[in-house]
Amino acid sequence: MEKEEKIYVSVVVPVLNEEENIVELHERIYNSLSQNKWPFEIIYVNDGSTDQTQTILEKLYKTHPNVRVIELAVNCGQHLALMKGFEKAKGDIVITIDADLQNPPEEIPKLIEKIEEGYEVVGTYRKKRKDSIFRRIPSYFANRITSYLTGVKLRDYGCMLRAYRREVVNYMNMCGDTTTFIPVLANTFAKKIAEIEIEHEERKRGKTKYSLFKLLRLNFDIVTNFSIFPIQFIGFTGVIIAVLGLLFAIFLFVRRLIVGPEVEGIFTLFAILFFFIGVQILALGIIGEYVGRIYMEVKKRPRYIVKKELL
Ligand code: UDP
Ligand code: MG
């Protein structure tokens, strides 16, 4: 049974083991949205939580007519959870927000205003990012690399409080990628992109759901999902190495003519050899990354398995 009405704003929240945060989060999103007269819905996508998250969400569903709950059978990652939410979102404007209250829900109206000015995607950057230095430094490089590879220069690709216009969400819904990174995916479908400054809070309750390894994987995803630059780079490096090798051979030949036969320098040769072996392994690894992705894609496993839908 779906609730039929014209929705203006859909807020999609991915939730993984956030039992301590949901009630406060819901209240704050609710208050922030009901100050205006927009008809809205809040879609919680439970990404395979193992704590009390689902029970709390179902309670919210029973007491609030504009709450939807989608429960995924197993954890499939923040971005796919959001994609599931997008499938069901009906609003003209779709907002994504983290469940851990690091992005204040009070900022949502600002994003809506910006979309109403005519932008198709509104991103945000965190004014004073309240995360550890070990998160901020890798993020700095990830943002620069992502901006370079995707051609859309944004200050903060990692901040997930963002707004999208209906059409952009429709286009994203047409994509069946098994791994994805929504801020980049959205930008490929938008011409008018804005980025506004928002507040950022520390995570007060619960732990971060991203281990170092998971973060690394996410960044690999961004690079390999949206560009084949690494493969082209390998080809380019190959050409440079071949040219250097040729120059070296000419150098040795000339030396041979001038100095005569030599046997020394064998260890130097080893060092050079090891370097190139390293380059080769790296190149194989990068190509392997793409082959692995093709493999995952051709298996055609479902992207997510829905256990329960309360719409
Ligand atoms: N999350 C999720 N599935 C995951 C990992 C995270 O749905 O596999 C949700 C999580 O509950 C939170 C948001 O994604 O609402 C961001 O996660 P987190 O705050 O742990 O990331 P961080 O702020 O540390 O980057
Ligand atoms: Mg967080």
Image (cartoon, rainbow, N blue to C red):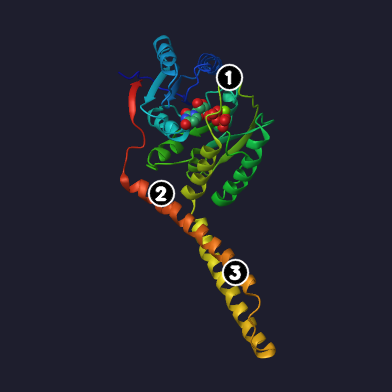
Q: CA distance from mark 1 to mark 2?
A: 35 Å
- Read off the residue under disc 2: 293
In this orientation, which residue lies closer to the viewer: 76 or 67? 76
Tag in front: 2 or 3: 3
Q: Residues within 10 Å of mark 2 (few under 14, many from 20)?
A: some
The disc labelled 2 sits on which kind of residue? Arg
Tell me how many marks there are: 3
- On the question of residue 206 being in view, the answer is yes
Q: Is mark 1 within 8 Å of ligand 1?
A: no
Q: Residues within 10 Å of mark 3 (few under 14, many from 20)?
A: few
- Read off the residue under disc 3: 270
Q: Is residue 293 left or right of residue 217?
A: left
Q: CA distance from mark 2 to mark 3?
A: 35 Å
In this orientation, which residue lies closer to the viewer: 142 or 40? 142
Residue at 32 percent of width and 48 percent of height: 298
- Toward the front, the furthest residue is 263
Horizontal and vertical percent position of residue 150? 54, 49
- On the question of residue 94 being in view, the answer is no
Horizontal and vertical percent position of residue 187? 51, 43
The disc labelled 1 sits on which kind of residue? Arg
In this orientation, which residue lies closer to the viewer: 96 or 242? 242
Tags 1 and 3 touching, CB below 8 Å:
no
- Read off the residue under disc 1: 205
Horizontal and vertical percent position of residue 68? 40, 20
Residue at 41 percent of width and 29 percent of height: 85
Q: Secondary structure at mark 3?
A: helix
Residue 158 occupies quadrant: top right
- Toward the top, the furthest residue is 63
